[in-house]
Structures are given as structure tokens and as C-alpha cells.
Amino acid sequence: MIVIGLTGSIGMGKSTTAQMFADYGIPVHDADAAVHELYQGAAVQPVEAAFPGVTVDGRIDRQKLSACVINNPDAMRLLERIVHPLVRSLETEFLQQAEQQGHVFAVLEIPLLFETEADRRCDATVVVTAPEDVQRERVLSRPGMTADKLNALLAKQMPDAEKRSRADFLVETHLGLDHARMQVGDILATLKARQPTRTES
């Protein structure tokens, strides 16, 4: 099974591209969704123990948690030490299940793929990209988003140019959905062609 790491900066169209892979019948593991799930389950107790008062109605309140770790690198590292192994566990279960089901591909959608060195666990990496002006226009149209908030988010992420330079493949989302779908199809065809041919027993 070929494991594809899918990433891209905020506003690049990563979720839309992930859905394109899913439309081909490929299982996709969304790291952000996994964290959301954990904040309602397995992560609640250890996170509350580390950051008392962040739980509301049995779930981690992300705003309260954010207030505890923002501008506090030590607190952020503590949170990552709690959450990252739990996310990895869910990811491992996902990949095992995908392989058992006989899938040729599986996609790991990870926003900080290169920053966390998760690309080492992938056979190929795909970066979703668009020009900076398109990115900013998309993100600033979101409710509650400001230029300052966007700049703060971008400061935490590897620059798009560096991501592109490290990627095995690119999906350019500013050229329209049809073009992006074509690129996804080309990526899958290229990767499938690299697979050794299986001989029938």
C-alpha cells in the first residue's frame, strides 16, 4: 500500500483536494479531525490534568486550551507530548485497517506534515498550493479572520515555497477544480505505475 502525505498551508484548498482523493475511493485520515475526536475522548483526562479548567461538559474547550498555550512554547510542547502519540495511534489503526481492506493507496492529511517530520512515514508527499494573493483572499473572506490573525497563523507554518520544494507532487488549486482533479488523477496514475506488478499465484 502506498501512503500519501497530503499537506498545504491555510487557505490553499487542502480539504477540497483531500475530498478529490476520497472520490477515487481512497481512505483519507484527517489529522485535525483526529484531534477534534480526541478532545472529546481519550485526550480529555490527560489534557485537563495538565491544563486544569479547559474542560467544558466533558470535552476540551479549544478556546480555553488555546489561551493556556498561546505565546507559551513550554505549554505548547507539553500539549504536543500528550496529543501527538494519541494522534499517531489513530493514524496507525487507520493504516492497518486500510491495508487489511486491500486499498492500493491511503492518504494522511496532515497540516504540519514537514514541520513534524511526518513525511518520513509517507511514500510520497503532495503539497496543495496557490499564489499568495489567492491564499490571502480566501482566508480573509472567512468569518472573524483578520490580517493579523492570518499573519500569526502563517508565521507558525513552513513557507509555501519551502513546502513546494520538498514535495514529490503539487496540486495547484487556483487553476480551477477540474485542473486540480486532473492533477490528483495524474498523481495516482504515476504512483500506481511505480508499483511492482503482482504475479498471480
Image (cartoon, rainbow, N blue to C red):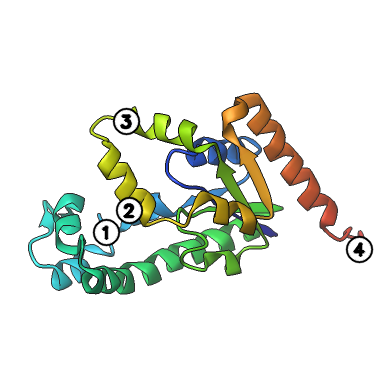
Direction from residue 29 to residue 42 in the image, left or right: left
Residue 164 relative to residue 191: left or right: left
Amino acid type, callout 3: Arg
Q: Nearer the viewer, mark 3 or mark 4?
A: 3
Q: Classify residue 189 by image quadrant.
A: top right
| Amino acid at the residue labelled 1 | Gly
- Mark 1 against mark 3, which lies toward the viewer? 3
Mark 2 sits on what residue? 37
In this picture, residue 176 sits left or right of residue 142: right
**Contact flag, marks 1 and 4 (Cβ < 8 Å):** no
Report whether residue 178 is seen.
yes
Residue 134 in picture, x, y percent from top left: 48, 31
SS at badge 4: loop
The N terminus sits in image quarter: bottom right
What residue is shown at x 41% (from left), y 30% (from top)?
138
- Residue 22: horizontal and vertical position, in percent? 58, 40
Disc 1 on helix, strand or loop?
A: loop
Q: Which residue is mark 3?
A: 142
The answer to whether the residues at label 3 and label 2 have Cβ atoms under 8 Å apart is no
Viewer can see residue 103: no
